[in-house]
């Protein structure tokens, strides 16, 4: 659908559902605000947090956020939770689900009322690539076994990050993904999809909407279950064929989002790396990569 074919009433309806400001105060004209299938793309100055907070408080929503502190990655857990307490879903009920093979290494952090840390003991894997890919299996299993009974939405993110600005209920939707900061603004030809036709993650050169980051996705628990179930099964099918997708679990996530469109898309404000600088479109840096020696941490 071309932009000129969008009906104004439909656009305003989408914006109202997200808690958008009235048109006269909607100041973002420099970035895309709606996907071709009319999913809102969330940027600063495009929503009213007070309206959204009231709606979600009325529904008594509980949010789960999942992180994987496997092997040496436990070193990031403290900073992650401490900064989340300052900026993530402030005033809302939150469960922190920490998957780890080193339960005793998970620190105690002071939490606001209605917020809990839940440590989940899981096995480690020898290669970091396997640790990354097996996240989908663990998220799938715990979604069905536990999360559906405990939270309404899941936010699945990388642990080696820190919150540096507000992240609230504006991100929540049935199914959401995040635009990859390193590939934002790149043409489809530049997207690093899996191009091996034998892989379950394969995306043809003439297909694809956006390139999504594997380190930030979520939705209601049922939708996260469906996503992670697809990704895990696709990875296991490829493994049986001795195929490993170019960007591991991220490649399968992009395949899923191609045929199961997200109902909300988060802008690069929600996942950024300061090594990329500060482009004009980036007015807020909400969630930042922690600088580290990847080789040392993954060894």
Image (tube, rainbow, N blue to C red):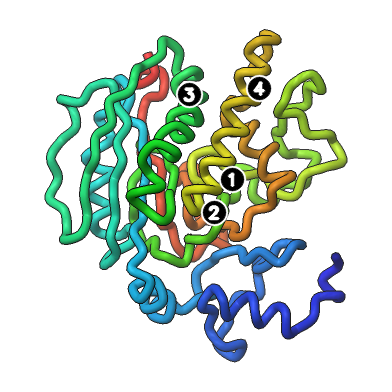
Quarter where residue 255 is shown? top right
- Decide which of 141, 228 is in the foreground and name it: 141
Mark number for residue 268?
2
- Give the mark toward the camera: 1 or 3: 3
Report helix, strand or loop for mark 1.
loop
- Give the mark toward the camera: 4 or 3: 3
Mark number for residue 180?
1
212 sits to left or right of 127? right
In the rendered image, residue 243, in percent from the top left (x then y), is placed at 68, 13
Mark pair 4, 1: CA separation: 17 Å
Q: Name the residue under label 4.
A: 245
Report helix, strand or loop for mark 4.
loop
Query: Which quadrant does the C terminus fall into?
Result: top left
Report helix, strand or loop for mark 2.
helix
- Could you classify mark 2 by the number of other residues whose Cα lies within 10 Å: few (under 14), some (14-19), or many (20 or more)? many
Residue visible at 43% across and 40% down in the picture = 143
Mark pair 4, 2: CA separation: 24 Å
Q: Mark 3 points at which residue?
A: 134
- Could you classify mark 4 by the number of other residues whose Cα lies within 10 Å: few (under 14), some (14-19), or many (20 or more)? many
Marks 4 and 3 close (CB-CB < 8 Å): no
Give whichever of discs 4 and 1 has the lower sequence position: 1
Quarter where residue 52 is shown? bottom left
Mark pair 4, 3: CA separation: 13 Å
In the rendered image, residue 206, in percent from the top left (x then y), is placed at 87, 41
Residue visible at 25% across and 30% down in the picture = 75
């Amino acid at each position: 659908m071309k932009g000129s074919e969008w009906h104004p009433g439909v656009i305003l309806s989408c914006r109202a559902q997200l808690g958008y400001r009235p048109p006269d105060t909607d100041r973002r004209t420099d970035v895309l605000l709606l996907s071709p299938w009319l999913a809102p793309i969330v940027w600063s100055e495009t929503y009213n947090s007070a309206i959204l907070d009231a709606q979600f408080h009325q529904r008594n929503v509980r949010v789960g956020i999942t992180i994987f502190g496997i092997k040496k990655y436990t070193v990031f857990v403290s900073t992650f939770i401490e900064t989340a307490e300052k900026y993530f879903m402030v005033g809302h009920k939150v469960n922190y689900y920490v998957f780890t093979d080193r339960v005793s290494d998970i620190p105690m952090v002071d939490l606001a009322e209605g917020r809990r840390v839940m440590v989940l003991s899981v096995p480690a894997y020898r290669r970091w690539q396997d640790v990354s890919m097996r996240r989908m299996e663990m998220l799938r299993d715990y979604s069905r076994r536990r999360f559906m009974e405990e939270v309404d939405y899941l936010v699945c993110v990388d642990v080696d990050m820190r919150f540096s600005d507000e992240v609230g209920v504006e991100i929540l939707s049935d199914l959401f993904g995040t635009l990859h900061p390193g590939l934002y603004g790149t043409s489809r030809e530049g997207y690093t999809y899996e191009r091996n036709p034998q892989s379950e993650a394969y995306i043809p050169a003439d297909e694809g909407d956006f390139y999504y980051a594997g380190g930030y996705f979520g939705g209601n628990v049922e939708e996260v279950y469906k996503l992670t179930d697809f990704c895990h099964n696709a990875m296991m099918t490829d493994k049986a064929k001795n195929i490993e997708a170019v960007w591991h679990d991220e490649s399968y996530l992009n395949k899923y989002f191609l045929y199961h469109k997200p109902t909300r898309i988060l802008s690069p404000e929600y996942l950024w790396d300061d090594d990329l600088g500060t482009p004009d479109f980036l007015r807020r840096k909400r969630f930042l990569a922690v600088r580290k020696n990847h080789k040392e941490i993954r060894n």
